[in-house]
Image (tube, grey):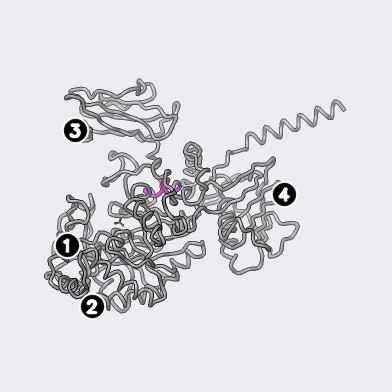
Amino acid sequence: MKSSFLIASTLMIVLNCMGQVQKRPLSIIPEPVSVVEKQGVFILQNNSVITVPNNPELKTTVDFLQAKLSTATGYKFIINRTNSSSAKIHLELNKTRNKELGDEGYTLSSTAQKITISANKPAGLFYGVQTLLQLLPPEIESKTIVKNVKWQIPAVEIKDYPRVGWRGLMLDVSRHFFTVKEVKQYIDAMVRYKFNMFHWHLTDDEGWRIQIKSLPKLTEVGAWRVEKIGNFGEFSNPLPDEPKNYGGFYTHEDIKEIIKYAEERFVKVMPEIDVPGHSLAAIASYPELSCTEGADKYNVRAGEPIMDWSHGAPPIAMLDNTLCPANEKVYDFLDKVMTEVASLFPFEYIHVGGDEAPHNYWEKNDQVKALMKREGLKTIPQVQAYFEKRLEKIINAKGKKMMAWDEVLEGGVNESTAVMSWRGMKYGIDASKEGHFVVMAPNDYVYIDLMQGDLATDPPVYATVRLSQTYKFNPVPKEANAKFVLGGQGNLWTEQIYNIRQAEYMTWPRGFAIAESVWSPEGKKNWNRFIEKTEVQFKRMDNAHTKYSPAMYDPIVRVTKKDDKYFVNLSTEIDGLDIYTSFDNSTPDNFYPKYKEPQLIPKDADLIRIITYRGNQPVGRLMTISVPDLKKRAR
Ligand code: ACM
């Protein structure tokens, strides 16, 4: 009795210890609705059976799972259409709808014997699969076979469903062009975090990227510009002898390919055709769309200044980048464009931009003045509303609904126009109360083109939105009429983003914060846990070859001025980091004095170097900032 007790308890201790060694804290992003951890682990084995009902809608999900598991492990998985007792991973659609889960929720149960994912609809199973992958080690994202795989999945009971139905990211492919392969790569990263909406910003001053067969010049002329590299927005004007060979466009076949790829991953694709402003590429192709003389000399913008924002919004345009609202040819043009867009994109909404249309050319234009008189329009925003209402009719006639940026509210558009609130939450809140459907994409939380780190490491953009700020995003604020809030999304404008690696760097980890804001229950958000999970996700990103920004480890540098003295104030965005500095041009390490209080910039210093450590490990990037640059930051 005594000895068997001893053996049993020794075994327990050994097993427990094994468990302890192996056990990783769960690091699922976005945080599920409920997770109950159990005793035991499931061990992933070669030749395991995956069962899935014989339903063509589930094919892509099971293919996705099989490909992912096999690529990293080298194992074979046997797909079975009936739930045999030998099944190790079982996907099932609920026979009776589980109301709580809705169309995108799922339950995941793992025991030592078996993993079962259940959902009402295929999308739920896909999200359950994403969670399952996050229960495996980060190496599951590896693109090649990982050696010595002995992977365990902890025993858990998970119930999960999204907070909102619209969980999006926008990619601007106009300012810089991204190939079909790169767009797919962007979508691949999105789906790991249960995003379901890809907003494709296809046209702007810097390039028209969608083939319109009835308007060939849009892509013969409008898709190409002079290539410039540096600080976009400050470039010199393109010269006649500079080749216009930068750009590209998507053919109808490319677009169908992307839509299919996204749909197989339960991502909808919303096209954006940005009018009446942001239309220089269209005007360079068809100058008759403008009502300003000289438009036939316009070029697709290459990053030279065209708007003066020094007076605030709306900007003063230095050239007229608007489609003329008083020109019937414009509505014929839009009809042709929307015919092809509507036939290509299955999604119910077409986004028509409507942002930042300058007033100054319309104010002085005789055709616009005549239109105002004829239609009884008192203000320029009303002129824009006239344009938007006509455009909405065109779009409705193609069987689609219209969405636009929040500026369109100013002149009074139809209630049926859905609104994307970007100038903060206010417009979205007000619009939801007026009965417009709304997507929240406020620039002060989810504009992921804005800097997340310091100027010493990131390209200059006019403002900063750090990860901690993005994490505060609440897509359904209590002031809004929640019934009309479709959801939320992050926006990646690409003026300063020249390649897909930088697009990823700007998106992640802020994309994690957006994912958790739009999926997880508000009360489940927890900044410190989020950071722990983010660090695990970084390892997944490394394996997936997806770039991300480590800015959360870097010091935050502020400068204050008192009398004629300047002080450097340092802090960190996340807990547990120490900061070390030098003004003597040397590289500081953790044996330098730890930063404790604002540091006076020594009179003759040239620069500061700053680095953060966690214990004895450097974690932040070494930042070097010259004293003149520090002084420019003084408040
Ligand atoms: C926008 O950021 N102009 C919608």
Q: Residues within 10 Å of mark 2 (few under 14, many from 20)?
A: some
Q: Nearer the viewer, mark 3 or mark 2?
A: 2
- Magenta-colored stretch includes residue 508: yes
User: What kind of element bears circle 4?
Assistant: loop
Label drawn at residue 113: 4
Q: Position of residue 506 (x, y in %)?
A: 36, 48
Question: Circle 1 is placed at which residue position?
Answer: 242
Residue highlighted by disc 2: 329
Find residue 202 and name its label.
Answer: none
Residue 53 is at least partly visible in this image: yes
- Which residue is at a point 72% across and 49% down the rendered structure image? 113
- Give left or right: position of 121 versus 566: right
On screen, residue 213 versus residue 3, left or right, reads left
View quadrant of ligand 1:
bottom left
Q: Position of residue 378 (x, y in %)?
A: 20, 66
Locate the C terminus and report the quarter of the image it occupies: top left
Residue 336 x/y as whole percent:
31, 77
At mark 1, the secondary structure is loop
Q: Is residue 620 above or below residue 238?
A: above
Residue under pointer 3 = 628
Q: Earlier in the sequence, mark 3 or mark 2?
A: 2
Of badges 1 and 2, the one in the foreground is: 2
**Label 2 secondary element:** helix
Q: Main secondary structure of the magenta part?
A: helix
State which tag comes first along the sequence, 1 or 3.
1
Pointer 1 and pointer 3: residues touching (CB < 8 Å)? no
